[in-house]
Image: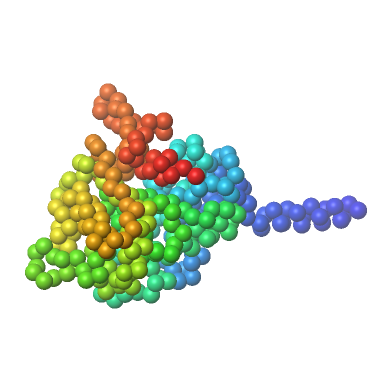
Amino acid sequence: MFKKSILSLLVMLFAAWTTPSLYAQTNGQEPYSKRGMGKFVFTEYAPLKNKPITVYYYIPKTGDVKNMRVLFSMHGAERSGKGQINQWRHFAEHDGFVVIAPEYSAKIYGGWAYQFGGVVRKGKVQPREKWTYSSIEAIFDHFKQITGSTAQKYDMFGFSAGGQFTHRFTLAMPDARLNIAVAGNPGSWTFPLIDGYPSKYEKGKTYGWGHSVKGTPMANEETVKKFLAHKLYIMIGKLDTMTVGKYVPKTKADLSQGKHRLARARNFYKTCKQLAKKNKWEFNWEKIEVPKVGHSCRSTVYGAWTEDYKGKRRFDINNYAEKSAYYLIFKKHAQ
């Protein structure tokens, strides 16, 4: 009897050790293994298996994760998934939603592969399954499998290069399980113009991906209509008017869209709205210009703040504006 008890105990210990537990206290490298913030390396998507993605996540400390909304938050050129978690973690804890922030290393995913999605490489359209955008759907499937989540859709916020990623994802993945998309302060936009975006500097020249859909599988009326019909917020700080700087896109293609991010966002929204009106297509976008905000992710997420005696901005989850990413996703569209 004693031997049988010992054997049973060993079997139970082995099972506990080998079975992933959502709330196990691990070193944080197991997928969704603890409450609060964690991370793991994602290689489960076969077409990109040799291009690992470090996935940061935040699971509130209380509540049933199976019933929580899911937000993907896409980083900018700083390539920090942890930074995106820090933008949202207090809201997530208070409201009870999960944040997933994939980190795409610049060494593995250059600009063409991150904000431009890996759609085109050296002028050649890549297989759709190898587009970086496809990894989001795979990460969502993986999350649902591990946690038992019942979420059928996810929301997405992206800032700067992440805003580029977000709006191009919405365009390139029309059948994805994306719910609300907020593209914050991108430096360039992909106009849904099948014949290309016209150059301001070279007569007769047009730009293709990622300044238009020209020459890609998205260059068709059906995809463009789905893009314009999606719930997409074009978000831009009214003070995001820098024309110089390391992270300000300034090729001729970029400058053809406008001299700075604010001008480009206005141009993009106006052009797309006119395109929808001309063709009598459904148009579900909104343009949100955030006052007193330049190129600041946290100011875009909160939309409001206080200032200390040194003039430094202080943020609090009880102080947010209607012109904020948080309000647009979680208050205006409460579920």
Q: Position of residue 233 (x, y in %)?
A: 33, 50
Q: Position of residue 265 (x, y in %)?
A: 23, 51
Nearest the eye: 22 or 52: 22
Residue lying at 37% horizontally and 34% vertically, measured from the top left: 320
Nearest the eye: 177 or 83: 177
In the rendered view, tell whether residue 163 sits above or below residue 125. above
Residue lying at 45% horizontally and 71% vertically, measured from the top left: 47
Residue lying at 51% horizontally and 65% vertically, measured from the top left: 44
Query: Can residue 174 be seen here?
Result: yes
Q: Relative to 217, is 255 on the left or the right?
A: left
- Residue furthest out toward the top: 309
- Residue furthest out toward the front: 280
Q: Relative to 17, is 62 on the left or the right?
A: left
Q: Relative to 215, is 169 on the left or the right?
A: right
Colour convention of the picture: rainbow
Q: Position of residue 55 (x, y in %)?
A: 46, 55
Nearest the eye: 106 or 133: 133
Query: Can residue 78 be seen here?
Result: no
Q: Position of residue 198 (x, y in %)?
A: 15, 66
Q: Relative to 332, is 228 on the left or the right?
A: left
Which quadrant holds residue 144?
bottom right
In the rendered view, tell whether residue 59 sits above or below residue 226. above
